[in-house]
Amino acid sequence: MVERLTRGPASVSELSRPLAMSMPAVVQHLHVLEHSGLVRSEKVGRVRTCTVEPAALRAAEGWIAARRTAWERSLDRLGEYLAEHPDEPPKRSQQ
Amino acid sequence: MSDRSTVHSTFAIERTYEAAPTRVWRAWADPEEKRRWFGPQGPAKAEHELEFRVGGLERMTVQSPGGAYKFIARFQDIVEGERFIHTYEMYLDDARISVSVATVVFEAAGGGTKLTMTEQGVFLDDLDSPAAREHGTGELLDTLAGHLQSTGD
């Protein structure tokens, strides 16, 4: 659903069409996304149009990428540390 | 926009080290050893404590320009030399910013060790705060600098 919305705003019925979900289930899912701040919706006449909140999406992606990067960096430092302190070398260390 | 949000993420990272699993394991289990590679290694100030047993806690606080980052982990499962699972929370000052489950698996690979870390996390609230952005950007730039240094010779 979020993936569809990153391509542009869509009505609730447009969002539900490709999904094997009942309309109430789609609406409930949208409520969760709206509550999380990732999606915004606006009702004009009888049509409710949903848009993704780009700032929230970017922030979350950036934050998660930063976390992953921090771990990648830690694990690289562990590799450097092990290379500098091999004081329990593997038994089969000959080439 | 609401300032409450929950975003879920799962990622896995793999590394292969030229050291036996018992050696790699000790680098995670021994507080003195873990301090040598985990957390800031530069002039940044960090406090770290580690009690590596099921139910034991690991805490680290790092002072940064964006605030004090706190990492609090609890070891949930330990199979000596093979795997451990910890749950951890991250705080920026007093605000909880994430809750995660991280699984670290150690496997013998040739004469070395293949390590796989899988994190399943919930990232909380007000993610776009200037402090969070600063932290994210800072980490990325640090990583880039570190990478350039290590590949520059």
Image: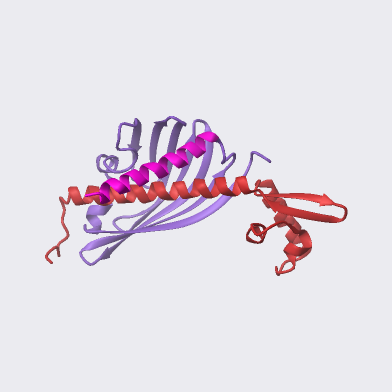
Number of labelled discs?
Answer: 0
Q: Quadrant of the N terminus of chain A?
A: bottom right
Which image quadrant is residue A12 in?
Answer: bottom right
Can I make out residue B91 in this image? yes
Residue at left 73%, top 56%?
A28
Q: In the rendered image of this protein, which colour is used for chain B? A: purple
**Residue B9 placement (x, y as % from top left):** 52, 54
The answer to whether one can see residue B56 in this image is no
Q: Position of residue B137 (x, y in %)?
A: 45, 41
Q: Please, which residue is most extreme toward the front here?
A: B152
Stretch of the chain drawn in magenta: B130-153
Please name the colour scheme applied to the rendered image.
by chain
Residue B58: percent from left, percent from top = 38, 40
**Residue B55: quarter of image:** top left
Counting from the top left corner in percent of width and height, residue B150 is at 26, 48
**Residue B107, placed above or below residue A70:** below
> Is B138 left, or right, of A81 in this rendering?
right
Magenta-span inclusion, residue B1: no
Residue furthest to the right in view is A45
B49 to B53, vertically: above or below: above
Q: Is residue B140 magenta?
A: yes
Query: Which residue extends farthest left?
Result: A94
* Residue shown at the point (31%, 45%) measured from the top left: B146
The one nearer the camera, A69 or B53, is A69
Q: Main secondary structure of the magenta part?
A: helix
Quarter the C terminus of chain A occupies: bottom left
Chain in red, by letter, is A
> In the picture provided, is A92 more to the left or to the right than A40?
left
